[in-house]
Image (tube, rainbow, N blue to C red):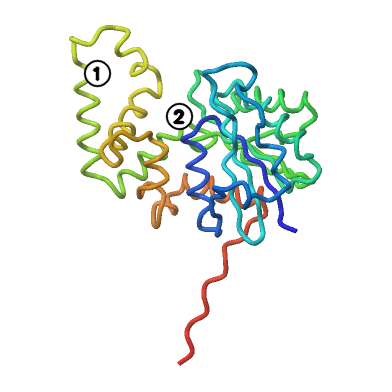
Amino acid sequence: MPKYGFLVVEGPHDVEFVYRLLSPFGMERVRLEKDLDPFFLPMIPRTYPPDGDLEVRMPVPLFLKCPTHAIAVRSAGGDTRLVGAVEEGSFKVGAERLTGIGILLDSDKMQPPADRYATIRDGLRAKGFPFPDEPAIVSPSPPRLGAFVLPDNRSPGTLEDILLECGRQVYPGLLARATAYVEAASQDSRLKGDDRKDLRKPSGRHKAIVGSMASILRPGKAVQVSIQDNRWLRGTTLMIPRVKAVQDFLADLLELTPPAAPAAPSP
């Protein structure tokens, strides 16, 4: 029987980020329901629209599997829904049967990452999930519990800060051009106040740069498609300290070990 894990993240970009970090452990996407471990069947919604809202996307997690593990990664659709998503998903499958339950969240609010985590932690504890006092700590009792506040549990920022570090390594020219483009747009007096409202947010500039790069790498596609398909999180970028820290956290939480290297051919 595989070990089961459940991860809740803020949005679809974070889902693909997790997928890329878990791929080196042999994790593959489950695309067909017939290939899904029956353990996770209760997480698949069976009615539409969810909660009667025609504009809400169906909350179907990304399911991953390898010979030793089966993992569900759910986008909560925003930071205010993280606690509810953890509670709902864990209840459906039985929290006691999970090896690990984890959360990835951003620290893009006007408060220190530790305070941001404390708000989520206290909400989870009120629901019966005794998450550790600090982020990046994994509780040992089954299920293992822990949260990581992007980008590094200390600095304000978002996933895009990590992606830009990766972009400097694998797409330096594209990053430079995208940065210049966003900088020029931010100074364009022909754009009205509402046009630049999101760009002026604390994380707006970095999100715009990543979005601009993704639109070149995968024209007409969402940023999460570029994260899945392109070289943001492959090879040497996985050794960038901030990236490695998240990957190590997930491995600890879910009790993952890298797949064994193939044996050398006989002489």
Q: Percent x, y for residue 252?
A: 64, 51
Q: Residues within 10 Å of mark 1 (few under 14, many from 20)?
A: some
Q: Residue furthest top?
A: 193
Q: CA distance from mark 2 to mark 1?
A: 19 Å
Camera sees residue 24: yes
Q: Amino acid at mark 2?
A: Gly
Q: Amino acid at mark 1?
A: Ser
Picture quadrant where residue 163 is located: top left
Q: Percent x, y for residue 239?
A: 44, 54
**What secondary structure is marked by label 2?**
loop
User: From the image, which quarter does the C terminus lie in?
Assistant: bottom left
Position of 94 with respect to 20 (left or right) is right
Camera sees residue 249: no
Q: Residue at x 62, y 46 (%)?
A: 33
**What secondary structure is marked by label 1?**
helix
Q: Percent x, y for residue 161?
A: 40, 35
Residue 200: mark: none
The residue under label 1 is 186
Q: Residue at x 76, y 27 (%)?
A: 125
The residue under label 2 is 157
Q: Residue at x 69, y 28 (%)?
A: 121
Picture quadrant where residue 120 is located: top right
User: From the image, which quarter does the N terminus lie in?
Assistant: bottom right
Q: Residue at x 50, y 36 (%)?
A: 14
Mark nearer the N terminus (2 vs 1): 2
Q: Percent x, y for residue 36?
A: 64, 49
Q: Is residue 104 above or below residue 57?
A: below
Q: Residues within 10 Å of mark 2 (few under 14, many from 20)?
A: many
Q: Nearer the viewer, mark 2 or mark 1?
A: 1
